[in-house]
């Protein structure tokens, strides 16, 4: 018996993993997919044509990057629900506007015109009754020092060149964002309490918590 059957999680469930860079979204996505026998939907970092350019010049490429992410995530969300669910998704579409676009607008690295264009496009595509929201958003959180250690450990060149102040600010913005997020139910997981790399068996406890949250919020999805 797999964990989906053990905890009676519906086969069509869609779970999105959210959290700041380096918090362990990909690890959590794969662990839950393996445990529940679900498909995965990973963020396509290596094929993004704007990402390297963006880290070299935020102001020049922030709008291009955000529009690219919005289009890709929208297509992926459509694909997931056309399959009939049964997916664990690495990063949510909501973070693009709530975290990244707003941060660049606030810091002056996205112009007011570009920000308005982007948010209008996001609202027209996502914030409608027709957009298929996930059944649950699992939010990964933890101390900023632990997160920065993880960023350094995975060794992506473009991230190594980014000042620590950027990661501190993003961490704070994520906390503010999740405290006001209400597009779907949220389960918060502290990475120091549930470290999948140190103890892979802890996935059983995480799935148990997911099942409990899904049962509590099932009326919201009807």
Image (tube, grey):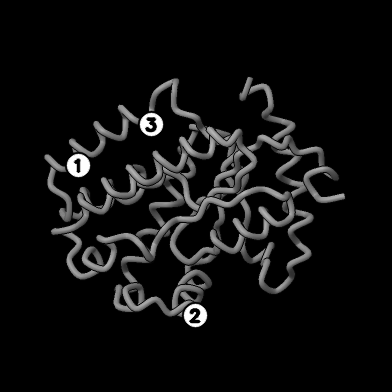
Q: Is residue 22 left or right of residue 127?
A: right
Residue furthest to the front in view is 83
Q: Which residue is mark 2?
A: 153
Question: Which mark is nearer the camera, 1 or 3?
Answer: 3
Alpha-carbon span between mark 1 and mark 3: 16 Å
Task: Mark 1 and mark 3 in contact? Answer it, CB < 8 Å.
Answer: no
Q: Foreground residue, 21 or 145?
A: 21
Q: CA distance from mark 1 to mark 2?
A: 33 Å
From the viewer's perspective, tell me whether residue 167 is left or right of residue 23.
Answer: left
Mark 1 or mark 2, earlier in chain: 1
The image shows residue 151, relative to residue 138, as above or below, that is below
Tag 1 and tag 2, C-beta contact below 8 Å: no
| 10 Å crowding of disc 3: few (<14), some (14-19), many (20+) | some
The percent position of residue 209, horizontal first and vertical second, equals 74, 46
Please tell me which residue lies in front, 193 or 158. Answer: 158
**Residue under label 3:** 126
Label 2 residue SS: helix
Rendered location of residue 156, percent (x, y): 39, 76
**Image: 84 above or below 159:** above
């Amino acid at each position: 018996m797999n964990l989906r059957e053990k905890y009676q999680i519906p086969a069509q469930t869609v779970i999105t993993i959210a959290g700041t860079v380096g918090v362990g979204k990909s690890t959590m996505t794969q662990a839950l997919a393996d445990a529940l026998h679900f498909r995965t939907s990973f963020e396509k970092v290596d094929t993004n044509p704007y990402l390297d350019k963006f880290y070299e010049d935020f102001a020049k490429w922030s709008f291009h990057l955000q529009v690219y992410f919005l289009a890709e995530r929208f297509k992926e969300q459509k694909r997931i629900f056309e399959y009939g669910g049964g997916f664990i998704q690495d990063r949510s579409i909501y973070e693009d506007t709530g975290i990244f676009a707003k941060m660049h607008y606030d810091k002056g690295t996205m112009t007011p015109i570009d920000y308005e264009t982007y948010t209008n496009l996001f609202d027209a595509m996502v914030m409608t009754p027709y957009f298929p929201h996930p059944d649950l958003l699992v939010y990964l959180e933890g101390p900023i020092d632990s997160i920065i250690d993880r960023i350094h450990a995975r060794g992506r060149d473009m991230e190594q060149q980014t000042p620590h102040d950027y990661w501190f600010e993003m961490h704070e913005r994520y906390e503010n964002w999740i405290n006001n997020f209400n597009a779907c139910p949220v389960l918060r997981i502290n990475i120091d309490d549930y470290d999948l790399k140190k103890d892979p068996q802890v996935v059983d406890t995480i799935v148990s918590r997911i099942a409990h949250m899904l049962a509590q919020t099932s009326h919201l999805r009807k």
